[in-house]
Image (spheres, rainbow, N blue to C red):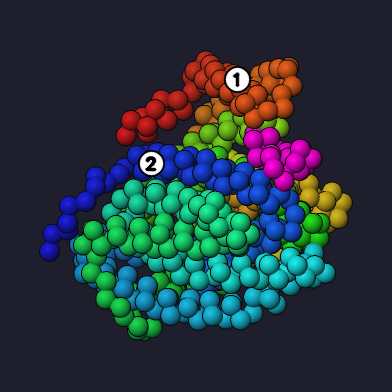
Amino acid sequence: MPEPTVKKTHTAGSAAMLLMASSFLSGLLALLRTKYINYLFGAGINQDAYRAAFALPDLLAYFLIGGAASISVITILNRYREAGDEQGADRALSAILTNMLVVLGIGVLLGEIFAPQYVWLANEGFRHDPARSSLCTQMTRIILPAQLFFFIGSVMGSRLQVRKIFVYQAFAPLIYNGCIILGAVFFHRGLGVTSLALGVFAGMFLGYALLNSLGAFRTGLRYTPTINFRAPAFREWLKLSLPLMVGVSLVMFDRQFINYFASITEGGITLIGNAKDLFNAPFNVIGPAAGAASLPFFASLFQQNKRDEFSHSVARSVSRLFAVGMLVSAWMIALAPWLMGLLKGGRFNRADAAATTLLFSILSITLAIWAVQGIYARAFYAASDTITPAVTGTIITIASAPLYWLLFRIHGLQGLAIASDIGITIQTVTLALLLHRKHLVSFGHLEYPELIRSLIAALLAFSATYELAHHLPPVTTHRGQLLIIAAGSASWLLITLAALLTTGSKLPRQLLRRKTA
C-alpha cells in the first residue's frame, strides 16, 4: 500500500538546520519561561522544589525506557524500511509502544507511591525542610504521568525520523515551553508554583504525544494495541535498550549529583539551575538538534555496510560541531554578565544574578564537549552497540560521584560546575577512544585544520568581545543590557568571520550550504 503524501523529507544538513531553528526559538521561549518563573518565585523554596520535582520522573524514564527510547526504535524501524516491510515496521512499533506503556504505567504508579521517600533521599537539604520536601513531592506526582506522553511522542517521532520528517519534532518543544508559561500566567495566583507542574503535564501531552502521533498517523501508521512481551520486535528493542536501562550516564546523573548537594543551600538548586538554563539555550541549538538529525543517517550508512563513509560522516559532524561549539563558548563567556542580567527581575535580584553568572561561565567552557558527546554516543547507537556506552557511562558516573562531593565541599556551587565540566570531558574523550579502537570512527578522519582555525577565531573573538563589552558604560536596565549584548555580538560575529576567512576556513561556507539546504 503506498504511503500517504507527507511534507518534503530532509537531508542530514537541512534536518539539522530545521531542528536548530526550532531549538533556537524554543531556547528563547525557555529563557522567557525562566525569567518569568524567576520574577514570580525568585531563588528560594518554591523554585527549588519545582526544579527538584523533575528528578524522579527523569530517572524513571531513564531506567525504564533507557532514557533514549527513540534511539533503539529508529534502529529497528530503519531496518524494516530498508527492507521495504512497512507492515512489519507498524507491528514492531505497536508491540514496543503497547508493552512499554504497561511497564511504564506500573513504574509511574510506584513512583506516585514512593515519591516522598525519593525526594527525601535525593535532596540532602530537603531532609530538614518539610516545606520544600512536601511541595516537591506534590509537583513530582503531577509531572510523573507526563512521562507516558513523552514516551508516546518518542516512539511516534521515531517513525517520522526514519522517514526524514522532522517538522513535528521541531514544534514539540515550542508547545511544551509555551504550556508552562501559560500555566504560570493563568494559574500562579491560585495555585502558586504548582501551576508550573500542570503546565509541564499539558506540554508533554500536546507537544509530544498528540503532535507526534498526528504526524505518525499522517504517514499511514497502522497502530494495533498489542500486549505481547514475546513479540520478536519487542524482544529486539529490549535487547538494544536494556544496556541503556541498567547502565547509567553522567549526562543524566550530572543533574542528580548537582541537585543533591545544591539543595543544602536554600536557593542553591535555583541558582545553578538558572546557569544550566542559560547554558542550554545555545547548547540545545547546536547539540541535541544535530545529534537527533544525524542518527537516522548514521544508522542508514552503517546498515548499508558503508563503514568508511560512516566513519567520515561521524568525524565530520564532530569536527564541525566542536568548531561551532568553541565559537559559541567564546560569545557566551565574554557576555556572561549581561546575558544573565536578562534573567534578573522581580524576586530574582541582582545578587542572585551575580552568583549565577560565575556558574554559567564555568559551565560554558565545555559547551563544545557536551555537544559532541551526543554525536559520539549516537555513533554507537547507530552501530547497534548500546552496551559499550552504557558500561562506560556507568563506570565514569560512579567514579565521578566523589569528585562532585569533594569539589562542592571545597568550592560550593562553583565546585559542582567544575565537577560537571571535568566529568563530561572524561566521558566524551573515553567514547571517542573506544570508537577509534573498535574501528568505527577513526581519529584520522577528524578535520584538525578546521579545529585549529576555529580555536584561533574563538580566542580572538572572545578577546575583542570581552574588551568591548567591559569598556562600554555600565548599565542597569534590560534595554541597556540588550544594547551591550547586541554590540558585543556584532563584534564577535565580525571577528569570527574575519578570522575564519583569513585562515581559509571552510566552516562559513558549510554552514551557509546547510542553511540553503
Where in the figure is residue 90, as x and y percent of width and height? Answer: 26, 69
Q: Name the mark nearer the viewer: 1 or 2.
A: 1
Residue type marked 1: Ala
Mark 1 and mark 2 in contact? Answer it, CB < 8 Å: no
**Residue 314 in the image, given as x and y percentages of width and height:** 45, 45
- Looking at the rendering, in which quadrant would you find the N terminus? bottom left
Residue 139 lies in the magenta stretch = no
Toward the viewer: 395 or 282? Answer: 282
Q: Compared with residue 62, is residue 34 higher up or lower down, i.e. above or below? A: above
Which residue is depicted at the point 48% across and 76% down?
Answer: 104
Spatial CA distance of label 1 from label 2 is 27 Å
Residue 172 visible in the shown view: yes
Label at residue 18: 2
Q: Is residue 350 magenta?
A: yes
Q: Quarter of the image holding residue 100?
A: bottom left
Count of numbered labels shown in the rendering: 2
Q: Which residues are magenta?
A: 339-363
Instruction: Establish if 102 lies above or below 161.
Output: below
Q: Residues within 10 Å of mark 2 (few under 14, many from 20)?
A: many
For disc 1, the marked residue is: 487
Q: Residue 142: x percent and y percent?
A: 56, 69
